Image: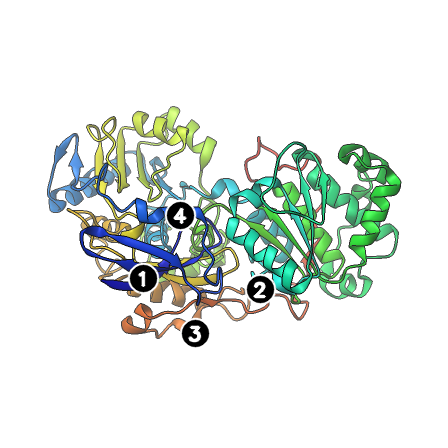
Amino acid sequence: MAVIRTLCGRCGVGCGLRAITGEDRDLMVEGDRMHPANAGRLCGRGLEIAEEVGLEGRLLQPMIDGRPQRWEKAIAQVARRLSAVIGQHGPDSVALHVGGGLLTEDYYVANKLMKGFIGSAHVDAGWAANDGAALAQHAAYGEDVMPAAYEDIERAELILMIGADLAQDHPVLNARIAAARAEQGVELLSLAPPGEGTSVEADLRIDVPREGMAAWIAGLLRHCHDTGATDGDYLARSVSVPDDFWAQLRTRHDLWSVARGCGLSPVELRALYDRIAAVPRIVTLFGGADEGLARAVIDFHLATGRIGRPGAAPFAMTAAANGMGGREVGCNATGLAAHRGFTAEAMAQVGRFWSAEAMATGPGLDGAQLAEAVRGGRIRALWSISGDGIDPAWLRAALDAVPLAIRSTPWADPERDGRGIALPSASWVEKDGTLTGADRLISRQRRLFPLPGDAKPDWWIVTQVARAMGWQAAFHYEWAAEIYREHVRLTAYGNEGARLLNLRRHAPISNPAYEELTPWRWGELPFDEGRFPTPDGKARLLPPVLGGRSPGDGAPTRQ
């Protein structure tokens, strides 16, 4: 019997677990009282981990065109076939899909191979559909930084929760809010679609159609501006306001228009807006998929100075366990590693650091655009690394259509294992590495059970393929700790305060220290001095997106 501190990995909260393991993969779990994200709380999904340690349905050996193979031959086949596709059709004929259940070390190595050595940025991330907030944060702050921490819930005077699904999808977060209400007297105001129940009792619930929530928040900001409740000093010192911003905000955001959408009279809505505007410390919790909503929330907090201090921040939640870690290493179609974009300087810096042989030169395709490229024959090879076992419908169709389909997965799939290449990877209870929660808290996921059969960590599989393709020196990793150290050094490389993501304190971390790593949050209290990682040090107010969502059928826009 062993007691291991590890992570749940079922959502972006990043709860710590205290796991008790026994023989025959017996497992008992409870919340880790020492972990900052949950302080011992645990929801039903966390407890279900103990029921998913069996080996039924697992892929336990490499398969090539339906035949089991040794790892050496499987790796050689992947390398040979990928090299042939690149040689005949170019690097842009190769695409990668990464699921939401990977660790930061997995994302880092996969991203490095694709963008630095294959030369393609076609990286579809399982959490990219929830990237609206990330795009808005980058546009507003100059960097994709979540300015809130879970501790802000206890420090706030008012929590504004937007969306019933947010309450239902994060039970531990709800428990934390309930405790803050009981112990600190924190007030909870909920905006939820009509007819949708919530798992948390609010002091006041307002029924707002989902498509009208961004307009409701924009109406709040307009009211604050019209009544002098914005922070003029903070705006002048720390925020750049587009010339026509306030004029655009006046469109469709008057009290009468907003009131019609939420079932209140203009008088009642004005009183509610006045009540909110009078509270200094507000945390706004919202789902991160909707860029229009994210823009409205961020604008409200910036214009009223409710950011960069305890208990006052916009807080975007995501369902992906390690979406934040994936964004940190740039494992998506739109960015480079360490919160860099595709600028000439960033490409040169990352290329030098990696000793890259074929740097990608611009953003790639993902989601619907990538699926269309597969159907049009532009994508000839697709590698899916999916630790969560949940593949979107377009990906399943793409894997059936693309000439070279490679799947790294813990799970057997009788319908697909007979075609292409299937590589057995670790399930969640067998993973070892780090994860970053929604509030920038880096924690250790520790392996609970030995890898079964021939299953291997995802980073190991990618490393072996890279070596077989001739890039041994750049992919020298034998331990996850080596990847973590390289990721840490890259966040500090060429970073003279230009980006808040700077993990340099862990650059010399030893393998034993990595094993014992305790949760820590990068960025301290972001923007506490009213300065932002933009060329002029100011944040930007973002013009509202009418209708709430980003253009393009809900897909994130590229800024």
Check disc 2 and report its element: helix, strand or loop.
helix
Colouring scheme, one of rainbow, by chain, secondary structure, one colour:
rainbow
Would residue 537 be seen by someone viewing this image from the given angle? no
Q: Residue at x 37, y 31 (%)?
A: 395
Check disc 3 and report its element: helix, strand or loop.
helix
Upstream in the sequence, badge 4 or badge 2? Answer: 2
Upstream in the sequence, badge 1 or badge 2? Answer: 2
From the image, state whether disc 4 or disc 2 is nearer to you. 2
State the residue in front, 370 or 28. 28
Q: CA distance from mark 1 to mark 3?
A: 15 Å
Q: Which residue is mark 1?
A: 483
As drawn, 420 above or below 228: above
From the image, state whether disc 3 or disc 4 is nearer to you. 3
Q: Which residue is mark 2?
A: 151
Upstream in the sequence, badge 1 or badge 3? Answer: 1
Upstream in the sequence, badge 4 or badge 1? Answer: 4
Q: Which residue is mark 4?
A: 360
Question: In the image, residue 133 lies at what x, y percent?
Answer: 58, 48
State the residue in front, 93 or 138. 138
Q: Circle 4: is it few (<14), some (14-19), or many (20+) Cα within 10 Å?
A: many
Q: CA distance from mark 4 to mark 1?
A: 21 Å
The numbered disc on residue 505 is 3
- Contact, mark 4 vs mark 2 (Cβ under 8 Å): no
Question: In the image, residue 35 lies at what x, y percent?
Answer: 44, 65
Question: In the image, residue 375 lies at what x, y percent?
Answer: 38, 24
